[in-house]
Image: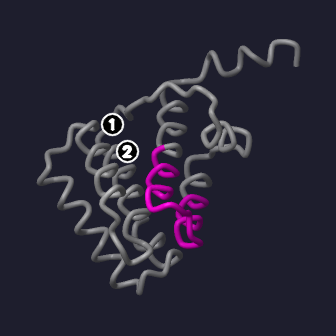
Amino acid sequence: MAFGFLKNMFKSKTDNAKLSHIRALVATALADGKIDDTEKAILAMVVKREGITEQEFEDALGGKKIEYTIPDDEHTKELYIRDIAAIMVVDGKINPEELKLCLAAAHTFGFSHERASEIIAQVAAAAMSSGYDGDKLVSELK
């Protein structure tokens, strides 16, 4: 396409929020130094749920500039915090850096520390009841 460069110039705020979310999930998953299989399962589920193409996923992973965008509605904000919390707890350990990233995202989205902690506790409880099985956790969080 002769004007392919224009495609990224006209991404919607919603598209940018989705790509920002993927980048935040990857950063959280990498905070402990590696992305394990359970974290990959959650990433794959979110990519599919959000309708993100392979190229958009590559862009989010790479150094391509993506304007950080906060979702507009409260439901999506909470869903995204739940996703980040799931990445954080699914391996059975909460890394301090992962927790810091999750809380920072929650505060950026306008959640109080108490509400953010409540969401994280709910996701942690779901992770424990699933036996830290990424697929089970993902289905419980839907």
Q: Which mark is residue 73?
A: 1
Quick one: label 2, few (<14), some, or many (20+) residues within 10 Å? Answer: some
134 or 103: nearer the eye?
103
Examine the image and state in which quarter residue 129 appears.
Answer: bottom left
Q: How is the image coloured?
A: one colour
Q: Identify the residue at horizontal 34%, vertical 49% (top origin).
A: 101
Q: Principal SS element in the magenta part?
A: helix
Q: Position of residue 93 (x, y in %)?
A: 36, 74
> Looking at the image, which residue sits at the far right?
1
Task: Write the start and end of the magenta stretch as one range.
Answer: 24-45
Give the residue displayed 38% in from the left and 32% down from the top: 70
Q: Position of residue 94 (x, y in %)?
A: 33, 68
Q: Are marks 1 and 2 in contact (CB under 8 Å)?
A: yes
Q: Is residue 89 magenta?
A: no
Q: Horizontally, is 118 left or right of 94 in the view?
A: left
Residue 76, horizontal then vertical, whole percent: 37, 44
Residue at figure coordinates x 38%, y 78% from the top left: 92
Kind of residue at badge 2:
Thr
Which residue is nearer to you in this view: 99 or 9? 99
Residue in front for this viewpoint, 31 or 37: 31
The residue identified by callout 2 is: 76
38 up-or-down from 1: above or below: below
